[in-house]
Image (cartoon, rainbow, N blue to C red):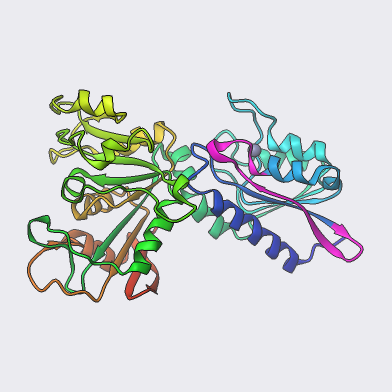
């Protein structure tokens, strides 16, 4: 029977939406949505759907197939990423094997996994077992959803999104790091929603010392989705008296300092539940950002949301470590010299259009958001 392209598009869109639901929860594994669809006399019927569970297991296919049960026989599996072909050290039956056992006869897969241990093997195994496999439906959107996973398995780095809010006259803060209410309420809610889709939120120590932020998700019902909080703190200046340290037992809080940073605050931070890690310094004397991100990737982090302040943001982009730069501009006018939100080198990089492309612009409340994506 010839598959209906409209049905395929509809069910793949659902699998991708399920994937998005799991973002931020499944690291070190990708968040994979899966939908099992069976043909009936009246048309296709969804008999199972699922997404990778918190911590990365069970996988989305396993959830969807379990829900489908016997109804998976002769059904089609729509999946947002190539099904896995091997058992990890954490065990579990590979999704390829599960699909075969369940009696799936067709697999529609959005994209091949870039994990070198799979990289087409999942699709090949399915095909060699006589399953029809169609690959590539909505691949661009799937690649965006799996960007963190792909970067980690391919390059040993997480995917990084840098976000900065600025006033109409271009400032991220007042003189002397004075705090200014820049974003509108809707934009604030949007930031919390974003945070919930990342594995880690990263901020620089200057921001942390100036604002004493919580860096968590404060949306009713979504508080549990707060990601790991990462503070870049070259000289390990973070005191144990600030909010991040005081709440470190509730939300994992990691501080990355330089190898040679003083140990003055370390014992108090560790006693509060903060994890202190160290990496080398870059040629500019600041933390080696690539080394810091590599460390996060080895800990399983795939997606980082950086609210790290203009200096860190500029460096992330210049060093080719940022995949996305989001600049929001509010109608608020500071009216005096403050902290420049988009520093000159970053501004030039975004304007020049070779390494970043303006993907879209939208209004959120009163604020105008520009989304720039790295050109690979
Ligand atoms: Zn799997």
Which residue is rendered at x = 63% and y = 54% of the image? 110
Q: Position of residue 202 (x, y in %)?
A: 31, 45
- Percent position (x, y) of residue 233? 20, 38
Q: Is residue 138 left or right of residue 221?
A: right
Q: Is residue 57 left or right of residue 309?
A: right
Rendered residue at 72%/62% (across/down): 8
Asked if the magenta segment contains residue 40, the reply would be: yes
Which range of residues does the magenta coloring cover? 39-60
Question: Which percent across, then down, holds residue 214?
Answer: 30, 47
Determine the residue positioned at 62% across, 51% down: 80
* Nearer the observer, 146 or 70: 70
In this view of the protein, can residue 115 be seen by the observer?
A: no
Residue 332, magenta (yes or no):
no
Q: Position of residue 44 (x, y in %)?
A: 82, 61
Instruction: Write down the quadrant of residue 253 in the picture.
Output: top left
For the point 59% across and 25% down, the residue is 90
Res. 299 in view: yes
Ligand 1 shows up in the quarter that is top right
Q: Is residue 207 above or below residue 250?
A: below
List the single residue furthest toward the right: 41
As displayed, is residue 175 above or below residue 235? below
């Amino acid at each position: 029977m010839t598959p209906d392209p409209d049905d395929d598009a509809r069910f793949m869109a659902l699998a991708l939406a399920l994937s998005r639901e799991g973002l931020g929860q499944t690291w070190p594994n990708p968040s994979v949505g899966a939908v099992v669809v069976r043909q009936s006399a009246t048309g296709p019927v969804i008999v199972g759907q699922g997404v990778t569970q918190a911590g990365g297991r069970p996988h989305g296919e396993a959830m969807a197939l379990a829900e489908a049960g016997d109804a998976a026989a002769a059904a089609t599996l729509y999946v947002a990423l190539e099904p896995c072909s091997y058992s990890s050290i954490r065990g579990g039956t590979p999704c390829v094997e599960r699909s075969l056992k369940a009696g799936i006869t067709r697999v529609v897969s959005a994209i091949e996994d870039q994990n070198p241990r799979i990289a087409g093997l999942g699709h090949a195994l399915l095909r060699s077992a006589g399953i029809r496999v169609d690959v590539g439906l909505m691949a661009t959107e799937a690649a965006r959803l799996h960007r963190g996973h792909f970067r980690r398995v391919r390059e040993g780095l997480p995917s990084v999104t840098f976000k900065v809010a600025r006033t109409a006259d271009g400032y991220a803060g007042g003189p002397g790091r004075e705090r200014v209410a820049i974003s509108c309420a809707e934009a604030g809610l949007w930031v919390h929603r974003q945070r919930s889709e990342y594995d880690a939120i990263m901020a620089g120590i200057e921001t942390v010392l100036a604002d004493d932020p919580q860096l968590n998700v404060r949306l009713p019902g979504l508080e549990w989705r707060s990601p790991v909080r990462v503070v870049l703190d070259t000289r390990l200046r973070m005191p144990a008296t600030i909010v991040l340290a005081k709440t470190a037992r509730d939300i994992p809080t990691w501080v990355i300092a330089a190898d040679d940073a003083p140990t003055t605050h370390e014992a108090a931070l560790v006693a509060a539940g903060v994890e202190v890690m160290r990496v080398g310094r870059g040629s500019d004397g600041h933390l080696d950002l690539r080394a810091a991100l590599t460390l996060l990737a080895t800990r399983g982090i795939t997606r980082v949301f950086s609210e790290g302040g203009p200096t860190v943001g500029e460096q992330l982009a210049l060093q080719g470590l940022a995949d996305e730069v989001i600049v929001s501009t509010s109608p608020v006018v500071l009216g005096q010299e403050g902290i420049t939100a988009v520093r000159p080198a970053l501004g030039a990089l975004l304007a020049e259009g070779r390494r970043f492309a303006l993907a879209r612009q939208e209004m959120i409340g009163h604020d105008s958001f520009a989304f720039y994506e790295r050109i690979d």
